[in-house]
Image (spheres, grey):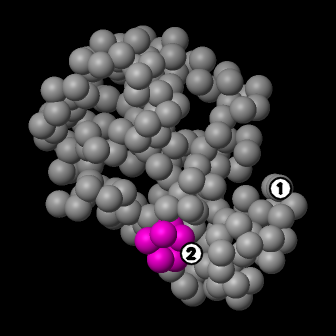
Amino acid sequence: MDLELPLPPAEALGRALKAWRGLRRVKQSHAAELFGVSQGTVSRWEAGRQAPSAREAARLRALLGATPDGAADAAILQLVRSSTAPVHLVCDMSHRLLAASRARARAWRVPAESLQGTSLWRYASDDIRRAEQCLGERGWFEPDAAPVTLVTRPNRFAEVPIRAGRVRWTRLRLSDGSFARLVETLP
């Protein structure tokens, strides 16, 4: 299975880009300069009529990634870290680790601090990769997305093991307009 993290559907990516621009008061022409494309290309992305190239997608992923920096975001990070349940929070766009509870970090063979800011996608089980591919069909990228529960088999990585079981993903909007994903292991 491909290890590359799939991009959201073109419509969802377009909404995210438009929201990012709106919150930062960036015109399409300036966004086009940032990406090295025409203003028309940015317009087509936002309308969901054109998907970005692999290079453009990488730049979009970096730009639209979650950057929790508001007071409410700090409270979410603290709630995750202090939770007694095995939970962690990742950027919904890149799967970069934003926070992990001690219960989650205890299962890992590498310190959570060393994983902070890095993508956990490489550790995803095949079941998680398949579920990621279907998120658009499940309405995940809609503003009021319902949590998604899935069953996964174990992954094959001792550093960051995933045990067989049920997992719930909840999508949270951060203060900068980006989204994070709360990952909970269910009993």
The kind of secondary structure element at disc 2 is: helix
Residue 141 appears in the picture as rendered: no
Q: Residue at x 74, y 72 (%)?
A: 33
Residue 133 appears in the picture as rendered: yes
Q: Quadrant of the N terminus?
A: bottom left
Q: Nearer the viewer, mark 1 or mark 2?
A: 1
Side of 64 where 102 appears, left or right: left
Label 1: few (<14), some or many (≥20) within 10 Å? few
Q: Residue at x 76, y 31 (%)?
A: 70
Task: Give percent across and percent down for residue 183.
Answer: 41, 35
Q: Which mark is residue 24?
A: 1
Task: Give percent across and percent down for residue 152.
Answer: 19, 42
Above or below for 166 versus 128? above
Magenta portion: prevailing SS class: helix
Q: Quadrant of residue 59?
A: bottom right
Task: Give percent across and percent down for residue 127.
Answer: 20, 50
Instruction: Check residue 53 for magenta coloring.
Output: yes
Side of 67 where 94 appears, left or right: left
Ranked by sequence position, the earlier of labels 1 and 2 is 2
Q: Residue at x 31, y 37 (%)?
A: 167
Please give the residue where the numbered disc 2 appears in the rendered image.
11
Residue range corresponding to the magenta coloring: 52-57
Above or below for 164 versus 132? above
